[in-house]
């Protein structure tokens, strides 16, 4: 009789562990999804700022059509890729970051543009947005790492296989592209020192 109770106790413990593991997977998956939504909000804010930035630059540098068109095209591509998954979105956002970097490099050749209050305000808003994207990216990737580790590790991999929990994609953006458009320089106005771009975390990121 004692042996039966031991067996029952073991079965109950295994069932409880099974349920606990499943519920943890659910929480981790939801956390990954929620942290991605936070990034998505900031990416959309970034996309919304770009048309005003392009028009402001156009007013001072009408001959820079190629650079301006590249930013416009990269923005359109990033917006269209939003429904294609995290990996595709990251690649599109990297291209957009590079296009913005080229645009800000061109702006250095136009002193009147660099001192424009509207241009500086847009630069500052982009800097703040990029900072939030970088922070959100680190948070998201940490959650992805935790989920993916449990999907691969034993015995949680058994639960993952039984209920269709799969690995999530990291949001990996080229660091140089991410930093390029967010260097805000107020030196032309005699203001505070240039704001430093946000530093990216450790990869994967």
Image: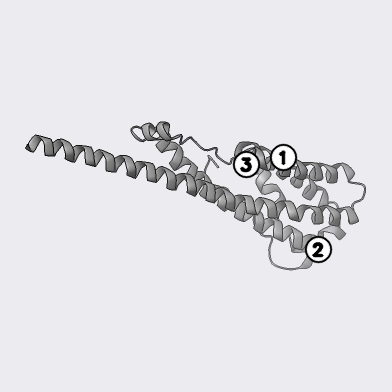
The Cα–Cα distance between marks 1 and 2, rounded to whole angstroms, is 25 Å
Which quadrant holds the N terminus? top left
Residue at numbered disc 2: 118
Residues 200 and 191: in front is 200
Most distant residue in the left direction: 1
| Residue ID at (40%, 32%) | 162
Q: Is residue 158 left or right of residue 44?
A: left
Q: Is residue 17 visible?
A: yes
Q: Is residue 188 above or below residue 6?
A: below
Q: Quadrant of residue 96?
A: top right
Residue 65 position in % (x across, y down): 89, 44
Please, what secondary structure does the residue beneath circle 1 have?
Answer: helix
Most distant residue in the right direction: 63
| Residue ID at (52%, 44%) | 141
Residue at numbered disc 3: 173
Residue at numbered disc 1: 95
Residues 35 and 106: in front is 35
Q: Earlier in the sequence, mark 1 or mark 3?
A: 1
The Cα–Cα distance between marks 1 and 3, rounded to whole angstroms, is 9 Å
Please, what secondary structure does the residue beneath circle 3 have?
Answer: loop
């Amino acid at each position: 009789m004692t042996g039966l109770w031991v067996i029952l106790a073991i079965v109950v413990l295994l069932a409880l562990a099974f349920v606990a593991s499943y519920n943890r997977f659910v929480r981790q998956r939801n956390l990954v999804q929620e942290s991605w939504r936070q990034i998505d909000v900031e990416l959309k804010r970034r996309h919304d700022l770009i048309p005003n930035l392009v028009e402001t630059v156009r007013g001072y540098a009408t001959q820079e059509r190629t650079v301006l068109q590249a930013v416009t095209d990269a923005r359109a591509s990033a917006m269209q890729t939003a429904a294609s998954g995290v990996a595709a979105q990251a690649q599109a956002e990297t291209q957009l970051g590079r296009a913005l970097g080229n645009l800000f490099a061109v702006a250095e050749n136009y002193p009147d543009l660099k001192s424009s209050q509207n241009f500086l305000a847009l630069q500052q808003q982009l800097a703040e947005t990029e900072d939030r994207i970088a922070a959100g990216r680190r948070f998201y990737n940490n959650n992805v790492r935790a989920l993916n580790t449990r999907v691969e590790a034993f015995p949680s991999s058994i639960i993952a296989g039984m209920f269709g929990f799969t690995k999530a994609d990291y949001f990996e953006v080229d660091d140089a592209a991410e930093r390029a458009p967010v260097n805000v320089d107020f030196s032309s106005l005699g203001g505070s020192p240039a704001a430093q771009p946000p530093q990216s975390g450790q990869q994967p990121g």
